[in-house]
Amino acid sequence: MLSRECTVSRNKVLQPDFKLAFLLPKYWLTWLGVFILYSISWLPYKWQLGLGRILGRLLFKIGSKRKHVADVNLKLCFPDMSKQERNRILKENFENTGIALFETGMGWWWPDWRVKRKFNVTGLEHIENAKQAGQNIYILAMHYLSAEIIGRGFGHSHPLVIFYRPHNNQLMEFFQFRGRGRSNKYMLGKRDVKGLMKAIRAGDSCLYLPDQDYGRNRSVFVPFFDVKETASTTGTLIFARQPRTKTFMLIPKRHDDGSGYSVEITPALDNFPTDNDINDVTRVNQEVEKAILRKPEQYMWLHRRFKTRPDPNAPSVYK
């Protein structure tokens, strides 16, 4: 048998095999893009940062729906911010978006020694102390633009089990899976709730990103920055409420001087979770807010965080 599709076992996403179909003409543009990204990944790091900023500035000047979405998000979250400051963050956010494209190549193809040289991880003692006390580990993170390289770098210090959404392009999925799995334990399908619960109870450190709009199902409307009613998932609490589980925050940043990346693990959240969904989800949002404010220009403002409104008939804030 030449290949099999990427499938899901009882609690692991299986690695997709190479398929002869990937050589068909419909994948040739993908191959070209992969070749260019792979080639650029071997350039000096600061060169890649510079190329990313140039690409981001070009995307900013061209304009797009994503630029409009990011601008709306910033206006809603920071209504008292000056237009000049908001435009600065928006412009730098697009520069970081360009950099993130090349960081994908770094995360997928850099050798281990090169990744480790660019990373500094602090706070691992909080996780180790919890493990020694017989606690399970549940880590919350945010959608940072540098997610691909951050995941690879942190995995070398502390491998994780992560939720995973396969790429729509099967050839990109072939490369994406291998890149994301190089330093982490394994991946779970994005809807495999039971799988992640099982992984937590088995003592694996598990990562979850609670900061996107996942729709009306299993969500409550609580504040996020200045938006008083933001659809926020209660799925976070399903995992946090597993027996003997401690919840930590993972806070990354790329250094402005081009020296690399830092990842901080905070102490476990005190008195979390409780039996009150509203209070607990509000607290998660507050923790996410504090993390974002450290480097707001590096956060993924491009996604439609406020697409689900309390009134389903209300017009979109992005129109």
Image (cartoon, rainbow, N blue to C red):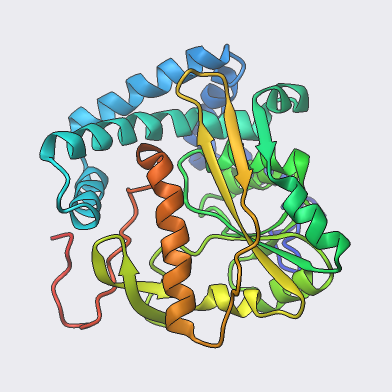
Rendered view: 103 above or below 316: above
Q: x and y percent of residue 15 in the render?
A: 75, 53
Q: x and y percent of residue 213 in the render?
A: 38, 67
Rendered view: 173 above or below 308: above
| Quarter of the image where one finds residue 112 | top right
Rendered view: 196 above or below 257: below
**Quarter occupied by the C terminus:** bottom left
Q: Is residue 182 visible?
A: no
**Quarter occupied by the N terminus:** bottom right
38, 221: nearer the viewer:
221
Q: x and y percent of residue 303 in the render?
A: 34, 54
Specify whether 226 is left or right of 257. left
| Quarter of the image where one finds residue 223 | bottom left
Specify whether 127 is left or right of 207. right
Q: x and y percent of residue 81 in the render?
A: 17, 45
Specify whether 84 is left or right of 116. left
237, 197: nearer the viewer:
237
Which residue is pictured at 34% across the width and 75% down the height? 222
